[in-house]
Image (spheres, grey):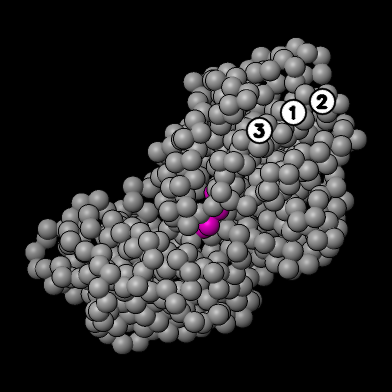
């Protein structure tokens, strides 16, 4: 069966969205005090005056401690604010190399806009911005942090460097939006007094970028990584191969990249990452506490590979390169031995380049592979991933084969996915398969917001900002054990997207909502308060040069 992805579904159902709004309005608001703080401080957002405009010490209410995306687990406001000044130091006393690097990263964020020197020092002291490992609160886990802000110092403590890094993102979001600008701005640079104690709901908080349908440069990927870090995501899933392009150099099969990577949707020049490019992305992601999860989509979505090597085809004839957007027409030749030489070589080389735990082998939309062949192929491919020391990830069609122990299935169904397909995933979860949730009608960032959205597709429906935020990963797949859900992902398919500006139009402002679903406690989930916090991100995104979709559902301030 051949499916045209962009045409196979109709637009979203407004009745469904209305029902969800009502449902969440009735949720108890467990974070009442936080909501008051957020509301009280919101009036202060527009208070920043233009740079260079007169009195240096203007009155400005610091942003309330809870006015963050993702909203933190606990906020205890109180006491005097801390202010960054020309003499502020960033202290990383007793710090390891990683802590020093986080200090340097923070200095790099703050220097251009504050114009201050902000030296990073390992000399201990009670003043300044202090980054400390060794918080002994086990509740903080591997990624949690505590931020205490008072007159003399703001101190971030954590058990692990990742926690300090996330705490730095909190500190950053508490500063005025103009801190994100690349040119010198006026102070004051205050952080409200009080304590934030925070740790994530889910350990797996991911964004996917499809670099196959259109190729994106290392610089464009780094730019996206920086944006993911601001919202405390910790995985970057790279969709490295598809029908339209193979994007990673594999030494033992060089034509995959040099020929298979030589075009893209629409017939542009495409491109691929050399091994050193890929390693640079991996290192850069690691410096932002994101783990790269590489995907080679198998056994379908393989036209670029089949075009590059005739012997991978059952008939021995290489098809032409493909630059359209149809899915489901390609398949590796399951009975041929050479197919497994190919899979072994690719997985071996990619695993060797990837320090992270996971290797994603796709498995979606294998409409040109018989069911029997699919099951046989996935069994062999999973064994190869295990042989090279990685944990298998696959799209949820993996559950229609035999997921190996420890495998992770990524659910990408949507409101009209059939009950049998859902049940298969639920049954696998009951049998121990872990799940990542990326429902296409919620978290797919390439779905159009409205029928008037120029970019994107609409086969899973129209996904406005509220719809993309308003769901619960723990209950989304009814019957799946709660412990089976490792986390969430916001995939971005790029059939219609060609550069960073287009990525950003689709990712923002939905990406922060998926990030919040992954990070914030379920009890904080509330569209009415979320949309106010999201609105407050608008000027920050603008300061970062991100041109986002001004959804009418969000009360943007001063935009
Ligand atoms: C997918 O959207 N085919 C995973």
Q: Main secondary structure of the magenta part?
A: strand
Quick one: SS at disc 2? helix
User: Going by the image, does 27 lie left or right of 557?
Assistant: right
Question: Residue 323, image x and y in percent?
Answer: 60, 21
Q: Which residues are magenta?
A: 233-237
- In the picture, the quarter occupied by the C terminus is bottom left
Q: Residue furthest bottom?
A: 79
Q: Residue furthest right?
A: 372
The residue lying at 60 percent from left, 19 percent from top is 255
Q: Which residue is mark 3?
A: 346
- In the picture, the quarter occupied by the N terminus is top right
Question: Residue 494, image x and y in percent?
Answer: 56, 36
Q: Which residue is mark 1?
A: 341
The residue lying at 76 percent from left, 32 percent from top is 299
Q: Nearer the viewer, residue 390 or 371?
A: 390
Q: Is mark 3 within 8 Å of ligand 1?
A: no
How packed is label 1: few (under 14 Cα within 10 Å), some, or many (20 or more)? few
Above-or-below relation of 34 to 300: below
Q: Nearer the viewer, residue 479 or 28?
A: 479
Could you tell me if the residues under marks 1 and 3 are in contact, i.e. CB atoms within 8 Å?
no
Quick one: SS at disc 3? helix
Q: Quadrant of residue 322?
A: top right
Quick one: SS at disc 1? helix
Q: Which residue is mark 2?
A: 337
Question: Residue 125, image x and y in percent?
Answer: 25, 79
The residue lying at 35 percent from left, 87 percent from top is 78
Q: Is residue 515 visible?
A: yes
Spatial CA distance of label 1 from label 3 is 9 Å
Could you tell me if the residues under marks 1 and 2 are in contact, i.e. CB atoms within 8 Å?
yes
């Amino acid at each position: 069966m051949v499916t045209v992805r962009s045409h196979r579904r109709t637009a979203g159902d407004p009745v469904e969205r209305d029902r969800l709004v009502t449902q969440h309005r009735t949720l108890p608001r467990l974070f009442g005090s936080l909501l008051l703080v957020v509301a009280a401080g919101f009036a202060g957002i527009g208070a920043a005056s233009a740079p260079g405009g007169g009195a240096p010490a203007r009155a400005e209410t610091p942003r309330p401690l809870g006015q963050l995306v993702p909203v933190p687990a606990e906020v205890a406001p109180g006491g005097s604010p801390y202010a960054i000044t020309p003499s502020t130091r960033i202290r990383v006393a007793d710090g390891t190399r990683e802590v020093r690097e986080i200090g340097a990263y923070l200095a790099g964020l703050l220097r251009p806009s504050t114009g201050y020197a902000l030296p990073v020092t390992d000399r201990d002291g009670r003043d300044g911005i202090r980054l400390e490992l060794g918080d002994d609160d086990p509740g903080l886990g591997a990624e949690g942090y505590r931020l205490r802000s008072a007159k003399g110092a703001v101190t971030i403590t954590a058990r692990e460097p990742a926690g300090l890094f996330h705490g730095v993102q909190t500190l950053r979001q508490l500063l005025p939006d103009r801190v994100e600008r690349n040119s010198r701005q006026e102070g004051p640079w205050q952080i409200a007094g009080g304590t934030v104690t925070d740790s994530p709901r889910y350990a797996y908080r991911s964004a996917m970028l499809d670099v196959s349908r259109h190729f994106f440069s290392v610089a464009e990927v780094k730019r996206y990584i920086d944006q993911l870090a601001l919202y405390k995501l910790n995985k970057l899933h790279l969709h490295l191969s598809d029908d339209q392009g193979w994007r990673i150099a594999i030494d033992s099969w060089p034509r995959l990249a040099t020929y298979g990577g030589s075009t893209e949707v629409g017939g542009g020049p495409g491109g691929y990452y050399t091994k050193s490019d890929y390693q640079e992305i991996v290192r850069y992601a690691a410096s932002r506490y994101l783990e790269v999860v590489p995907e080679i989509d198998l056994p379908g979505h393989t036209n670029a590979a089949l075009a590059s090597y005739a012997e991978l085809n059952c008939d021995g004839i290489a098809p032409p390169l493909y630059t359209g957007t149809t899915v489901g027409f390609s398949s590796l030749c399951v009975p041929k031995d050479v197919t497994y030489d190919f899979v072994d070589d690719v997985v071996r080389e990619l695993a060797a380049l990837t320090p992270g735990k996971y290797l994603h082998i796709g498995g979606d939309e294998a409409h040109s592979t018989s069911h029997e062949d699919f099951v046989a192929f996935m069994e062999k491919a999973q064994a190869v991933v295990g042989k090279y020391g990685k944990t298998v990830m696959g799209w949820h069609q993996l559950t229609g084969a035999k997921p190996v122990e420890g495998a992770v299935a990524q659910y990408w169904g949507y409101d009209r996915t059939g009950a049998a397909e859902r049940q298969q995933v639920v049954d696998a979860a009951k049998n121990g398969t872990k799940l990542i949730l990326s429902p296409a009608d919620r978290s797919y960032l390439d779905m159009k917001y409205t029928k008037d959205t120029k970019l994107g597709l609409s086969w899973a429906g129209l996904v406005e900002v509220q719809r993309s935020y308003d769901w619960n990963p723990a209950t989304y797949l009814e019957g799946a054990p709660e412990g089976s859900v490792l986390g969430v992902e916001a995939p971005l398919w790029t059939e219609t997207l060609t550069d960073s500006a287009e990525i950003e139009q689709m990712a923002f402002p939905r990406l922060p909502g998926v990030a919040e679903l992954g990070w914030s406690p379920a009890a904080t989930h509330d569209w009415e308060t979320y949309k106010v916090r999201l609105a407050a991100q608008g000027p920050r995104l603008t300061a970062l040069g991100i041109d986002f979709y001004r959804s009418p559902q969000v009360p943007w301030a001063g935009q």
